[in-house]
Image (tube, grey):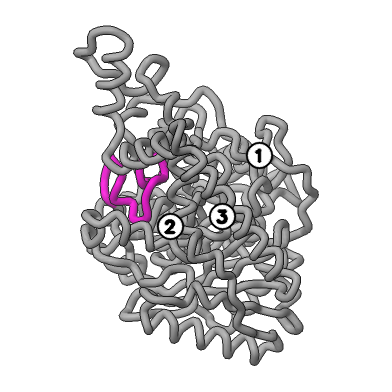
């Protein structure tokens, strides 16, 4: 049996039954990475020595702990914008070359506490700014379903690693769809939790009021397992909320009978592929056959979500990225004359074109004389979007839509057209602006490429999202894997 094909749930069961060891499982994953990652290019750093050491420690715990954590001994991958002590964290940017954090992010501490084995750091769009992972300064990741196509972004490396069986599960971050969009493109499950549910301490900030860490996994059950492991209040993060989560695994049993589903018509508009629209219509029929109620609704502010996002997110990025100056860590220009010249040359050399574009957009929006006209207005739109969601959830338990308007596009197809690239996140951005949870699950193929269904819920209602997603997953039975991963 190919151990790398196991899900988290399956791997945990075999580890606890002493059918396999964590070292055997980790070696299988590392061998798989060695075999296929030259094609996929999901990883920026592979910690073979560290992973095997962690696996040996996990096996010691497994030998003595009768009721150890589910993730004990399970190999996972981590997006390279999350700090890992002693392991490089580059955000796929030249400006952070050589940076090795002296501490672990809170989610990394949580994973290590559970006994998970961290095999490496995955590729992303530089500083998580992009929708295709083509903005990485390091390399371009391929989609395991078709290596000539993008895996989505910005957590493209994490999604691709799971789809290609190079990790049993993975961690990503989602600012405007960066977990869910690549999950849809790569045919895996991606969950963006409620803002504040998972600590952001140690996540290199892009847009602090939008960023959220979450899991990418092979199925919904595994997403629930990983979410349980990383959730919790953290005093190191001022936006972390005091909330006692339910048992997410238990919530999977609820099903969807009697739940009311709303379909925002604005997310089925122009630009949505006919095959994707057909797939979602099939899911609507399935929901009704399982006892759910479905009705169309209108959230009129959604048409303003994309422009509001691309003012708010760059504005926050322009502030957050000012800390990268070449003085304390990372890349520093060698031929600079004086401090100001050093700042200019370091940032000119260190930041890629998309990051520069967003910094300039954000700085402009925050400039005196333009603040009220742009940033102030965008925040007002955000408030209206939140109200639209609040009103919708008075009538519906959940909202559903396509995760993406198209399937994965070819590498290079949109790099010269930033607006078309930004439109890839048109369905996912509203939930980030409102801070609500949302999941993407694979529900079929269109032209041989995966299609994702997005399910959005109320704040802290991950349990209902997961139960609905699991009920649909069981019926769809999406077990098709990319040829590469076969």
On the picture, is 302 further left or further right than 145? right
Left or right: residue 262 versus residue 137 is right
C-alpha distance separating marks 1 and 2: 23 Å
Can you say whether 216 is above or below 95 in the image?
A: below
- Mark 1 in CB contact with mark 3 (< 8 angstroms): no
Q: Nearer the viewer, mark 1 or mark 2?
A: 2
Which residue is more in the foreground, 197 or 318?
318
Residue carrying label 2: 159
Residue at figure coordinates x 44%, y 63% from the top left: 426
Q: Can residue 206 be seen by looking at this rendering?
A: yes
Residue shown at the point (51%, 88%) measured from the top left = 282
Q: Which residue is mark 3?
A: 381
Q: Is residue 264 magenta?
A: no
Disc 2 is placed on an element classified as helix
Counting residues from the N terminus, which is met first, the one under dot 1 or under dot 2?
Answer: 1
In the figure, residue 423 lies in which quadrant?
bottom left
Name the disc covering residue 113, or none: 1
What segment is highlighted magenta in the picture? 121-140
User: Where residue 55 appears, x then y in whole percent?
Assistant: 54, 42
Q: Earlier in the sequence, mark 1 or mark 3?
A: 1
**In the figure, 326 relative to 258: above or below?**
above
* Residue ID at (74%, 83%): 257
């Amino acid at each position: 049996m190919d151990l790398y094909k196991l899900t988290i749930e399956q791997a945990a069961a075999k580890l606890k039954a002493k059918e396999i060891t964590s070292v055997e499982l980790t070696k299988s994953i590392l061998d798989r990475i060695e075999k296929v990652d030259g094609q996929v290019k999901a990883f920026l750093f592979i910690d073979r020595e560290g992973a095997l050491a962690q696996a040996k420690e996990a096996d010691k715990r497994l030998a003595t702990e009768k009721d150890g954590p589910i993730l004990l001994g399970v190999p996972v991958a981590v997006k390279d914008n999350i700090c890992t002590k002693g392991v490089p964290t580059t955000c796929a940017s030249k400006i952070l070359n050589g940076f090795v954090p002296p501490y672990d992010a809170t989610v990394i501490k949580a994973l290590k506490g559970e006994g998970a084995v961290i095999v490496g750091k995955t590729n992303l769009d530089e500083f998580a700014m992009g929708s295709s992972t083509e903005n990485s300064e390091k390399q371009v990741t391929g989609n395991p379903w078709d290596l000539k196509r993008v895996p989505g972004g910005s957590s493209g490396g994490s999604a691709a690693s799971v789809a290609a069986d190079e990790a049993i599960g993975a961690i990503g971050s989602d600012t405007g769809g960066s977990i869910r969009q690549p999950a849809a493109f790569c045919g895996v499950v991606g969950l963006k939790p409620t803002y504040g549910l998972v600590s952001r301490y140690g996540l290199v900030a892009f847009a602090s009021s939008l960023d959220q860490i979450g899991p990418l996994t092979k199925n919904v059950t595994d997403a629930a397992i990983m979410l349980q492991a990383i959730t919790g209040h953290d005093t190191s993060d001022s936006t972390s909320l005091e909330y006692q989560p339910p048992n997410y695994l238990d919530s999977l049993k609820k099903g969807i009978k009697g739940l009311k589903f709303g379909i925002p018509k604005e997310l089925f508009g122009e630009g949505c592929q006919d095959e994707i629209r057909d797939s979602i219509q099939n899911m609507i029929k399935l929901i009704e056959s399982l006892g759910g109620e479905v009705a169309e609704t209108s959230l009129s502010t959604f048409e303003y979500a994309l422009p509001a996002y691309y003012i708010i997110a760059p504005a926050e990025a322009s502030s957050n990225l000012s800390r990268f100056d070449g003085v304390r860590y990372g890349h520093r220009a060698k031929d600079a004359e004086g401090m100001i010249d050093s700042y200019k040359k370091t940032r000119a050399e260190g930041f890629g074109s998309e990051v520069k574009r967003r910094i300039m957009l954000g700085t402009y929006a925050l400039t005196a004389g333009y603040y009220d006209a742009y940033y102030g207005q965008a925040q007002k739109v955000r408030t209206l979007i939140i109200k639209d969601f609040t009103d919708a959830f008075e009538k519906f338990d959940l909202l559903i839509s396509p995760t993406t308007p198209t399937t994965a596009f070819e590498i290079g197809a949109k790099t010269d057209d930033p607006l078309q690239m930004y439109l890839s996140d048109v369905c996912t951005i509203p939930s980030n602006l409102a801070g609500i949870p949302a999941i993407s699950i694979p529900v079929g193929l269109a032209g041989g490429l995966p299609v994702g269904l997005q399910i959005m819920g109320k704040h802290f209602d991950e349990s209902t999202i997961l139960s609905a997603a699991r009920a649909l997953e069981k019926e769809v039975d999406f077990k098709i894997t990319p040829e590469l991963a076969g």
